[in-house]
Image (spheres, rainbow, N blue to C red):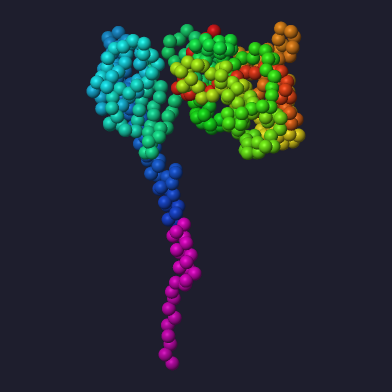
Amino acid sequence: MKEFKKEKGITLIALVITIIVLLILSAITLNMVMGDNGIIVKAQKSKELTNQANAEEDVRLRILGARNEKGEINNESFLESFKNSQDEYLIELAETATLSESGIKEASGITGDFVNVTNLTSWPEIKVKVRISDYTVVKSEATNSSGSSTVATEPMIIEKGQQTARPITTADYGKKVSYLNADGTGQMANKTWRLFYVEDSSNLFKDGEGTIYLKADWTANDYTGSISYNAGTTLIRKLNPDWSKARGNNEGEWTDGEKGAARLCDTSLWEPTYKSTNTAYTNKINWVVGAPPIEMFMKSYSQRVSGATNYGAKYFSSNSPGYMYTENGTDYQYSTNDDTISLEEANGMYLPFKEDEGGQFCMEWLASPFAFMPSYLCAVAPAYLAGVGYDEAIGACPVVSLKSSVILQEID
């Protein structure tokens, strides 16, 4: 009998498995090449950073070329070097220098503005800003393909006795600054403002990295809380992100403590008094509220004070929805231990005076609900953190959010 040789071949199941494996590999490859963190995106970011560095270096070379034999920089020579440039630069003008479409001309009364020096052609994705008063590159702006801008601005401060600005550090927290009461109007002139916090890369409060926050000093237990607020202008959700995740969408169920915090976060109640009416300042202010939120307070304190990083505040719903204080991230408490918060740190910014002229204990509001009781808000007392009822009379210490391009001036 004739034997037939059995042929071996691929089965349908093996074919299906092979196709699935190939599809998975294709998806992985596409993601590596085209994904948000893929090769193409990384290459584009690398190109942006290279162009940005080249543009900044070009500006620095122009600064070097504008120096005379004595090493002094001539404003006119520096600006003139851009006259025939094919690239765009944004220069902050000195008092006597300004620009027109046809080039550079002299004028008076021009201060503090950034202007385009030439038309944008050669480096379409990069703009460089340099402050002509001290020849510091203060901002580089990269424009992406959609036309929007990604701005990396380093907040700056001019120290007492100095003429030039330098980058802000956490060691500057607590310094008195002159920005808000510069026009001397209203009660702004009656408040002492201190550098409280600069937003980091976490962008926790959604104003953007580099945003500057100033806090007014305690003056008296002069603000009695309330539960009335404007739902359209309160920033309670924005300023209390951990609480907002659990309670932000349940406004109809808010406790009196949550409503009291919403009032302290209501910009319509605080900006008429503490937001400058001078348009030169108004355009640089994001918002004003009546007190710092607890999460911002703890971030500022932990950045400024050595060894304080184990303190914090988290949303908790034990007795009532609100914040409790933490140590080491997990030890929930209704108040911190005595002397947890140092009166001496940051020139006493984190605590009010121990007592007023009448011998009354002094406290400060924090714009956050407290988990101890439904009617309570977080508060600062001498040497510790606790809470008080929304209708108590304690000190309001307003907080102002400034754009990162603002330059602070330290004062005595």
Which residue is drawn at the image coordinates 45% and 59% (left, top)? 23
Q: Viewer-proximal residue, 87 or 1?
A: 87
Highlighted range, magenta: 1-24
Which residue is drawn at the image coordinates 38% and 14% (left, top)? 111
| The image quarter in which residue 116 lies | top left
Which residue is drawn at the image coordinates 74% and 36% (left, top)? 318
Of the 4 image quadrants, the one containing the C terminus is top right
Q: Viewer-proximal residue, 304 or 364?
A: 364
Is 309 part of what is drawn in magenta? no
Of the 4 image quadrants, the one containing the N terminus is bottom left
Q: How many marks?
A: 0
| The image quarter in which residue 305 lies | top right
> How far across and down, in percent of the image, does residue 369 sit?
68, 29
Is 11 part of what is drawn in magenta? yes
> How far across and down, in percent of the image, does residue 196 sit?
57, 20
> How far across and down, in percent of the image, does residue 320 sit?
73, 34
Vertical placement of residue 317 versus 274, above or below: below
> How far across and down, in percent of the image, does residue 91 sit?
35, 20
Q: Is residue 316 visible?
A: no
